[in-house]
Image (cartoon, grey):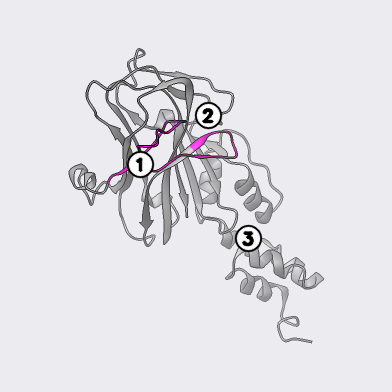
C-alpha cells in the first residue's frame, strides 16, 4: 500500500487542490477513497476564482449547484449573464481562468446614439437581449474596456470582436485593431502596434490582414490583440480593445456586433 493512500481524505484533498482540474478528474479513478477526495469541495473551491460567490450573485438567473465541482462545470459549460444582461461570464474548462464577453451595450461605439448610424436589435443567435447593427457610418470606432482586477492574474489573454455581417455589408475589408493598458500607454503610442483585421465575409485576394474564424455559436470572431495580466496585486487599471477605421468617404454598413470577448490563451 502506498503512503498516499493511507493518508486521511482531507490531506489527499489538500494535495489534489494544488494540481489542476484535469489532474483531479484523473486521480478520481485511482480508488474509491481518491474519488471522494478528488470530488470534495476543498479541491474544487481552489479551482474556482476566489471571488466566484460575488460573481454568481450578479447572475440574472439563479445558479443551481450541488457541490463546488458541480458549480465549476456549470460555469465552464454554460455562460451566465451578469449586470442586467450586459455582460457574460464563464470559466475556461481546462484551467478555471475567467472569461468575459462584453455585450454591444457595454461597448463605446461612435455614433451609436444615432439611429441612422446604428441600431440595437434582437438577434436569435445572441446570448444577449440586443446586438448592435451598423446601418451606415464613415468612422468605425469600437472600444471595449474591462478592469484587469476582474480577470485572472498571471494569465495571457486575447481580446476578440464577436460579430457577423449581413448579406448586404460594405466597407469592412480593412480595420485597425489594438489592445492597450489605458493607464500605461496613450492612444497615439498604441497606434504604432495596431494590426489590420478583416471583417468582411468574402476577402479580396489583394488584402492582407487577420481573418475572422467561425465559432461554435454561429458567430464569427477576429482577434483584436493579446496582453498579459500580471500579479493580482498589480493595478494595471483598465485594458482596452479597440477597432478603428477612419478612412474618409469610405462608408461602412452591415456589421452586426455581439460584443468583445476577453479569454485566456
- Give x and y (percent) for residue 90: 55, 45
- Give x and y (percent) for residue 124: 59, 24
Q: Quadrant of the image for the N terminus?
A: bottom right
In this view, 113 is above or below 243: above
Residue in view at x 67 percent, y 56 percent? 69
Give residue 208's mark. Answer: 1
Report whether 92 appears left or right of 3.
Answer: left
Whole-Å distance between the Cαs marked 2 and 3?
29 Å
- Give x and y (percent) for residue 60: 56, 33
Q: Quadrant of residue 235?
A: bottom left
Q: Which residue is mark 3?
A: 44
User: Which is the main secondary structure of the residues drawn in magenta?
Assistant: loop
N-terminal of the pair, mark 3 or mark 1, is 3
Q: Nearer the viewer, mark 1 or mark 2?
A: 1
N-terminal of the pair, mark 2 or mark 3, is 3
Task: Check whether the beta carbons of the residues at disc 2 and disc 3 lie within 8 A of each other.
Answer: no
In this view, 155 is above or below 138: below
Q: Nearer the viewer, mark 2 or mark 3?
A: 2
- Label 1 crowding class (10 Å Cα cut-off): few <14, some 14-19, many 20+? few
- Give x and y (percent) for residue 163: 47, 32
Give residue 128's mark. Answer: 2
Amino acid at each position: 500500500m502506498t503512503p498516499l493512500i493511507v493518508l486521511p481524505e482531507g490531506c489527499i484533498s489538500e494535495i489534489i487542490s494544488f494540481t489542476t482540474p484535469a489532474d483531479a478528474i484523473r486521480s478520481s479513478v485511482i480508488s474509491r477513497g481518491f474519488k471522494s477526495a478528488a470530488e470534495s469541495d476543498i479541491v474544487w473551491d481552489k479551482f474556482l476564482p476566489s471571488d466566484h460567490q460575488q460573481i454568481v450573485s450578479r447572475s440574472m438567473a439563479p445558479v443551481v449547484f450541488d457541490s463546488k465541482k458541480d458549480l465549476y462545470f456549470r460555469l465552464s459549460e454554460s455562460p451566465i449573464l451578469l449586470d442586467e444582461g450586459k455582460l457574460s461570464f464563464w470559466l475556461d474548462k481546462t484551467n478555471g481562468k475567467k472569461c468575459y464577453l462584453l455585450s454591444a451595450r457595454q461597448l463605446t461605439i461612435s455614433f451609436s446614439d444615432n439611429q441612422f448610424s446604428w441600431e440595437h436589435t434582437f438577434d436569435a443567435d445572441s446570448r444577449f437581449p440586443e446586438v448592435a447593427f451598423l446601418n451606415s457610418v464613415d468612422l468605425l470606432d469600437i472600444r471595449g474596456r474591462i478592469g484587469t482586477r476582474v480577470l485572472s492574474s498571471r494569465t495571457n489573454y486575447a481580446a476578440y470582436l464577436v460579430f457577423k455581417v449581413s448579406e448586404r455589408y460594405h466597407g469592412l475589408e480593412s480595420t485597425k485593431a489594438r489592445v492597450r493598458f489605458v493607464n500605461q500607454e496613450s492612444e497615439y503610442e498604441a497606434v504604432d502596434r495596431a494590426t489590420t483585421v478583416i471583417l468582411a465575409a468574402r476577402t479580396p485576394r489583394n488584402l492582407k490582414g487577420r481573418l475572422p474564424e467561425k465559432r461554435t455559436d454561429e458567430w464569427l470572431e477576429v482577434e483584436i490583440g493579446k496582453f498579459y495580466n500580471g500579479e493580482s496585486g498589480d493595478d494595471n487599471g483598465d485594458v482596452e480593445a479597440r477597432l478603428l477605421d477612419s478612412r474618409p468617404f469610405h462608408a461602412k454598413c452591415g456589421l452586426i456586433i455581439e460584443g468583445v470577448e476577453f479569454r485566456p490563451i
